[in-house]
Image (spheres, rainbow, N blue to C red):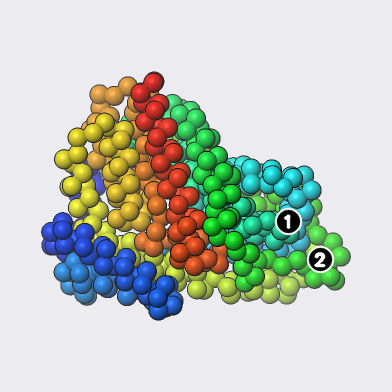
């Protein structure tokens, strides 16, 4: 993997579109976020429009030319839709195929038959952690949502009691466990040992996900008691469907993209030569788009055929799966546009400049820097890359163990308090049918718990290792 450094990041980054000072930029961030929250909560404006207007307000308050603000917003929107939009579409298609063929019913019925009420949140953590290991959070949500919603509905569970553990499992993988792409970037930047980081990561991740998942879900279910949204809920196949896919075939279809992406990550680690033909082949096969596309195509045969679907029925299933996601795509894309406007206005660089004067232990400094960049930009990836580049010089004289802990501190900090400038916030809100306030009280608080508990455990380990 390419080595990252502060110099490389600085050289690749375009100049900010605003020349405002730190104080003005800080005020601009508050103005932009306040406009978004006010428009959605008070005036009930659609989140896509609110994010668009909030981005313009942010740029105006930062003193940036509005034409460049528009360019930043549309660039971020386009990049987000390009990277996530196709994955959401493919995932929605696979989810609809699972639902209409009876495959999702087969999984839900099997889980409900083998897991008791108290064990269900723990089962969801385990499933989400396995699925979330090699893939980005957005892809994991797309794969898990049909199962989460159907388990909540059929088992008469609180949506938060089932959904929060699943989201916690995905998030912890996203921030702490290689070969997930985020931790791998930090490992490369800090020249950390992959095996040691993985071992410490598992040690930190297990108690972190327990606290932020099954335990917090009890509280979240009391704070926000909502049913699974009917518009996103896969329905049981019609009564005329006389047969459905087996549990094994359905599970293989769902796990196929996970397996392909995990194979890619393992080949990248073992071969570690971008020019190698085998690694290049697996880079294509394990790309999220190809992996999900393969699952959809395979699903036509493993799910559609056992259910007796004709070609016309398969085409109708694909069309119906794509229809509900138009609004989600626009909202997630607008969230990416707002994030890019923040970055292009120089907010991320402002945070890096201010944090250079902080005099605290390296592990805590890395966590705090990642937290602040995460809050400012809304991106866990941007927080990871920026914080890793900033603290990389500190790792030069560290032991192997402490360098690995520095990586985990950055990963934990990058999860802190997801809010309106994070595309993941809008994904959770729309898929679970929540209001902005309900999303904050569940998803945002859960992310904060994961970040704080993970960071605290890393700090404790740094004192005793």
Pick whichever, 107 or 277, lies toward us.
Answer: 107
What residue would you read off at disc 1?
155
Mark 1 nearby-residue class (10 Å; few <14, some 14–19, many ≥20): some
Picture coordinates of residue 405, whole percent (x, y): 37, 30
Picture coordinates of residue 233, whole percent (x, y): 65, 66
Residue 308 - label: 2
Residue at horizontal 29 percent and vertical 24 percent from the top: 398
Pick whichever, 357 or 226, lies toward us.
Answer: 226
- Relative height, residue 334 to residue 188 (above, below): below
Secondary structure state at the residue bearing disc 2: loop
Q: Is residue 442 left or right of residue 69?
A: right
Residue at horizontal 84 percent and vertical 70 percent from the top: 239
Image quadrant where one finds the N terminus: top left
Q: Quadrant of residue 311?
A: bottom right
**Is any part of residue 177 visible from this angle?**
yes
**CA separation, marks 1 and 2?**
27 Å
Pick whichever, 416 or 94, lies toward us.
Answer: 416
Residue at horizontal 52 percent and vertical 35 percent from the top: 207
Picture coordinates of residue 271, whole percent (x, y): 46, 34
């Amino acid at each position: 993997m390419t080595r990252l450094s502060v110099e490389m990041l600085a050289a690749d980054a375009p100049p900010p579109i605003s020349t405002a000072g730190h104080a003005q930029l800080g005020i601009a961030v508050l103005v932009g976020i306040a406009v978004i929250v006010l428009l959605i909560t008070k005036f009930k404006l659609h989140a896509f429009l609110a994010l668009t207007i909030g981005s313009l307000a942010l740029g105006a308050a930062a003193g940036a030319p509005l034409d460049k603000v528009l360019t930043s917003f549309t660039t971020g929107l386009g990049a987000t839709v390009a990277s996530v939009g196709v994955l959401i579409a493919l995932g929605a298609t696979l989810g609809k195929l699972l639902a209409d063929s009876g495959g999702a019913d087969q999984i839900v019925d099997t889980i409900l038959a083998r897991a008791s009420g108290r064990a269900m949140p723990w089962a969801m953590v385990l499933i989400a952690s396995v699925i979330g290991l090699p893939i980005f959070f957005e892809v994991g949500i797309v794969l898990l949502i049909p199962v989460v919603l159907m388990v909540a509905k059929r088992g008469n569970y609180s949506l938060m009691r089932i959904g929060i553990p699943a989201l916690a499992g995905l998030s912890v993988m996203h921030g702490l466990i290689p070969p997930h792409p985020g931790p791998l970037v930090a490992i490369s930047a800090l020249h950390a040992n992959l095996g040691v980081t993985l071992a410490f990561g598992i040690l930190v991740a297990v108690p972190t996900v327990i606290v932020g998942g099954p335990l917090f879900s009890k509280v979240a279910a009391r704070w926000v008691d909502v049913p699974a949204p009917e518009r996103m809920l896969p329905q049981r196949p019609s009564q005329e469907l006389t047969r459905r896919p087996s549990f094994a075939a359905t599970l293989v279809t769902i796990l196929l993209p996970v397996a392909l992406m995990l194979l890619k990550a393992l080949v990248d680690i073992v071969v570690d030569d971008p020019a190698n033909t085998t690694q290049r082949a697996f880079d294509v096969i394990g790309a999220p788009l190809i992996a999900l596309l393969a699952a959809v195509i395979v699903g036509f045969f493993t799910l559609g055929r056992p259910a007796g679907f004709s070609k016309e029925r398969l085409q109708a299933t694909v069309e119906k799966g794509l229809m509900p996601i138009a609004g989600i795509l626009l909202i997630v894309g607008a969230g990416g546009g707002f994030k890019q406007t923040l970055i292009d206005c120089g907010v991320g660089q402002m945070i890096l400049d201010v944090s250079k004067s902080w005099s605290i232990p390296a592990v805590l400094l890395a966590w705090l820097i990642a937290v602040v960049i995460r809050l400012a930009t809304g991106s866990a990836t941007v927080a990871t890359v920026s914080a890793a580049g900033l603290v990389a010089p500190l790792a030069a004289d560290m032991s192997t163990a402490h360098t690995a802990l520095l990586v985990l501190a950055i990963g934990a900090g990058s999860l802190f308090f997801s809010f309106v400038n994070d595309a993941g916030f809008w994904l959770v809100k729309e898929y679970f049918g929540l209001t902005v306030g309900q999303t904050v009280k569940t998803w945002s608080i859960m992310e904060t718990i994961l970040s704080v508990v993970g960071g605290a455990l890393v700090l404790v380990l740094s004192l005793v290792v």
